[in-house]
Amino acid sequence: MTESTYAAITGWGSCMPPAVLSNDDLSTFLDTSDEWIITRTGMKERRISHVSATELATLAARRALACADLDPADVDLIIYGGVSNEELCPNSASGVQVSLGAQNAASMDLNTACTSFCYGLAAATGMIRTGQVRNAVVIGVELISRYMDWENRNVAVLFGDGAAAVVLQATDNEEGMLASVLGCDAQARQTLRVRGFGCGYSGYGITLGDTFWDFDGQQIFKRAVLGMSRASRDVLAQSGLKAEDISLVVPHQANLRIIESVAKYAGISMERVMLTVEKYGNMSAATVPVALVEALEEGRVEPNSWLLMPAFGGGLTYCSLLVKWGSRTIPLEQTDVELPPCNESALELVNQVRARQDPYGRSRDGLLAPVFPEAQLRDGDSVV
């Protein structure tokens, strides 16, 4: 390793489940409508997976490796970014390692909610630049449909399933993620909480699958815009770049209005912003990498161009990454591996999950008392 070692993005691939859940589908069991959802979120559809999160992550990684023409045996590190794990132990990254045949790879999970892929990209880049590894696979994956509180309209209309991955490789060329700003607005962490998972709820009568979401939409909106805008401003200043130097913004797709606000504060027109929120909704950790893959497939990533990747998630974590793209935007190879066929509609898959959730009809209000201290959110608190 020398001081000129960088971590180039040499491979990319996504895995989107085929089953599409429309706004009209949601209106069959929620008090909502297509117009209500579109005007508030910009979302029309989202995907519901018929396979496990590990299968989604593995196929995305396999496509990324083919794109880079890299043998799985040459992978030194796998980072599985997201909040959708099959189980807590063993970790999910090890399951991807086995499925890929990447027997030489260190494997770890990274959970910063919606920013997990971006944090993972920053972590893997740092490990390559310091010489710990040479080849890494970073995955953003979510299977939120399996633990969504489908009776809560505030969150049930927002989220979908999906996965994407990138391959990073050591290079002497100045490319890849060259700067990052990572942060956490932890005083407001209770504004987005999935109650029912974790040691804090032991003994509270909750079984796996009984999840109840806390989601303060107004606070999250305000803090998401502030966190991503400030991080984007700071990462540009850190690099000596201006808004006009950015060819494409690839943001977290939480809400169309949030994306528009961040672009406005950054001084970047929406014509230079990659959007997938309309057809995929919020896929949490998968949104940024899926949008990146689609931008490449659509020819929106130019060789040697600058990309800005702002994101925000539960915790409340935020970040913005600055990526210098390399010379190649076309895959070297492709894989013919596909997901198994899906024989059920997205609505049927969701209704199966709904049928298994909370069979005793317990109220979601006041069910779980936190068993750990929390800082109180004060109106007007700033991110930094």
Image: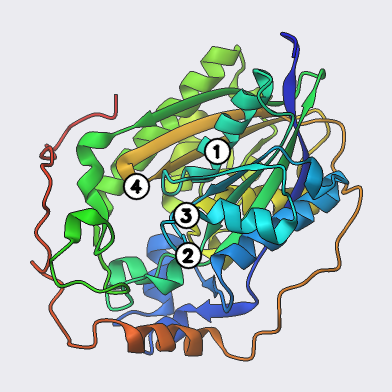
The kind of secondary structure element at disc 3 is: helix
Q: Which mark is first along the chain, 1 or 4?
A: 1
Q: Which residue is mark 3?
A: 284
Q: Position of residue 236 (x, y in %)?
A: 55, 20
Of all residues, the one furthest to the right in this rendering is 332
Q: Is residue 11 left or right of residue 120?
A: right
Q: Residues within 10 Å of mark 2 (few under 14, many from 20)?
A: some
Displayed quadrant of residue 108? top right
Indicate which disc, 4 or 3, sits on the residue closer to the N terminus: 3
Mark in the foreground, 3 or 1: 1
Residue sitting nearer the eye, 45 or 10:
10
Give the image location of residue 244, x and y in percent.
Answer: 64, 25
- What is the number of the mark on residue 323? none
Tag 4, which secondary structure?
A: helix
Q: Which mark is residue 314?
A: 4
Query: Up-down: is 223 above or below 66?
Result: above
At mark 2, the secondary structure is loop
Q: Amino acid at mark 1?
A: Gly
Mark 4: amino acid: Gly
Q: Is residue 197 above or below residue 372?
A: below
Percent position of residue 15, x then y:
68, 63
